[in-house]
Image (spheres, rainbow, N blue to C red):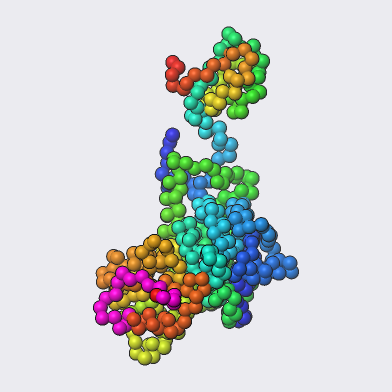
Amino acid sequence: MNEKTWKEIPIGGLILDAGNAAEYHTGDWRTERPVHILDKCKHCMFCWICCPDSAVIVKDKKMVGIDYDYCKGCGICKDVCPFDAIEMTIEGTED
Amino acid sequence: MAKPMALSGNFAAAYATKQINPHVVAAYPITPQTLMMEKFSEYVANGEVDTELVCVESEHSAMSACIGAAAAGGRVITSTAANGLALMFEVVYIAASLRLPITMCVMNRALSGPINIHGDHSDSMGTRDSGWIQIFNENAQEVYDTMFQAVRIGEHKDVMLPVMVNFDGFITSHKFERVDTLDDAAVRDYVGTYTPEHSLLDTEDPVTYGPLDLFDYYFEHKRQQVDAMRNALPVAREVLTSYARETGQNEYDIIEAYHLDDADVAIVALSSTAGTAKFVVDRMRAEGKKVGLLKIRLFRPFPVEAVREALAGVKQVAVLDRSDSFGAYGGPVFAEVRNALYDAESRPGIVDYIYGLGGRDINAVDIEGVYNRMLSASGRMAGDVQYLGVRGD
C-alpha cells in the first residue's frame, strides 16, 4: 500500500473518489482458500448464486474460477456444491 | 446600530441563533437548556427563520442529526447540558473527527449522580478531549456575541471544527441582563454564507463521510485534528480581537486580564465566577490590595502562551475549578494552568480551589477569602488542592 502522511490526505477521513470499494481487496482477509476442481464441475451455478462477495468468475455460462481479490474464504461455495467440485485449503499451504 | 434588549443567557443564545438563521437545528430539551430551544421553536413557528428544526428523541440523536446536516453542507446549531451532553458523548467525538463546524451551546450543569440540575462545569470538562473548541462565557452579552464568533472560528478553512459555547446553568442561562444586540443585517454580514469544500448533497462531486479507518490511517486523521486545534488558537484570537472593530460590539480576546499588570496575587476562573471576582477585585483594589483576575475564555485549544504571559510577575495564583477530576492532581483548569506555568521564567505559587459543585453558591466573601489567604500567606503556597464552600473542609 502507498501510505501517505497526514498532510497528504483529505481531512475528516473523507474519501473523495466515488466507487472506490473496488480498490479494497477484501480477499486479504482470507484464511481458507476455495479451489475449483474443473473435472468435477457441472457448471450448475449454485456457487455463483450463493457467493456473498460475487467472487465466482463465470464466462460463457461456465464457472471458470474464483476471484481471489475479493473472495473472503467463507466456504459457502464448497457447502452448496452438489458435486464436491470445490475444496477448501488453508491459505498459504498451496503451491 | 446596537439595540439593547433584556435577555437571559438562553434567550440571548436563541436570539443569536435566530439571527444566524442556520439551515438546521436539532435538539432535545434538558434543564437548564430548555428555554433556548423553546424560544427558538417560537421563531420557527412564527416563520421568522428558514431553519429546519428537527425534534429528535434524545441528545444522541440530536448530535447525530446535526452531524448528518453538517455533512450535507448545512450550517448547524444545537444545545444541551449535563446528562444530555453525556448521552451524546459518542457522537460529540464523531462531529469533531468528521471536521464539521457545528455550534453547540452547553448550559453547564452538574452531572448526575446524585441527581442535580444546577450549575457546574463537569459536563463540558468531560468533553474537553473530544476535539471541540470550547469557549466559556461570563454573561448573556458574551453568550450572544460568542455565537457569531463561534460560527466564524469553526468554519474557518484552517480549522473546520465544532465549537462549544459554554455558560453557567441557571446563573447565566436564566438570569436576565442587558444585552446589546446587532441588527439582523449586521449579523448576516458578519457570519456570511457557509460554503464547505465538500458536502454529501453535492452530486457533482460525490464523497464518502465516515468510512472505517483502522491502524493504517486513523492516527494520521487524529494528527490532522491536532493541527486544526493548533490553527484554532490564532484563528480564535483573530476572530475575537477583530470582533469589536467589525461589529461595534465589546472587545473580546481568548483570555481577559483584569488588574493583572501590577498584581501580587491572582485568581484564575471561568464563566460567571469571573464576574463575581471582578467585583471583589474592584473592592479590594479600593483598599489598596494588589489583586488581579485572569478569566480564561478559550479553554480548548488552551492558550498556554497567553496564560503564561498574563501571570508573569504574579507571585501567587489560586485557580477556581467548578468541576473535579477525581483521582487527578486538582481540577481541569488547575492542571492546565499549572502545566502552562512550568516553563515560566518565574513560577508563581499555585493552589487549586474546587468550588460550586452542583450549583453551590460562590459569593464575593468566598472569593475575598481566597485573595486574603494568598495575601497573608507567609511564603509561597503551592501544591494545595482545597474545597471551597463544602461543609467539613
**Identity of the residue drawn at 43% across and 19% down:** A93
**Identity of the residue drawn at 50% across and 23% down:** A32
Q: Position of residue A54 (x, y in %)?
A: 61, 26
Q: Considering only vertical position in the picture, is B43 above or below B74?
A: below
Start and end of the magenta stretch?
A: B374-392
Q: Residue B85 sits in which quadrant?
A: bottom right
**Identity of the residue drawn at 42% across and 62% down:** B326
Q: Residue furthest bottom?
A: B287
Residue B120 within the segment the image draws in magenta: no
Q: Nearer the viewer, residue A56 or B71?
A: A56
Is residue B223 shown left or right of residue B109? Answer: left
**Identity of the residue drawn at 32% across and 80% down:** B374
Q: Position of residue B206 (x, y in %)?
A: 60, 44
Q: Considering only vertical position in the picture, is A11 above or below B140?
A: above
Residue B381 within the segment the image draws in magenta: yes
Residue B39, can we see it?
Answer: yes
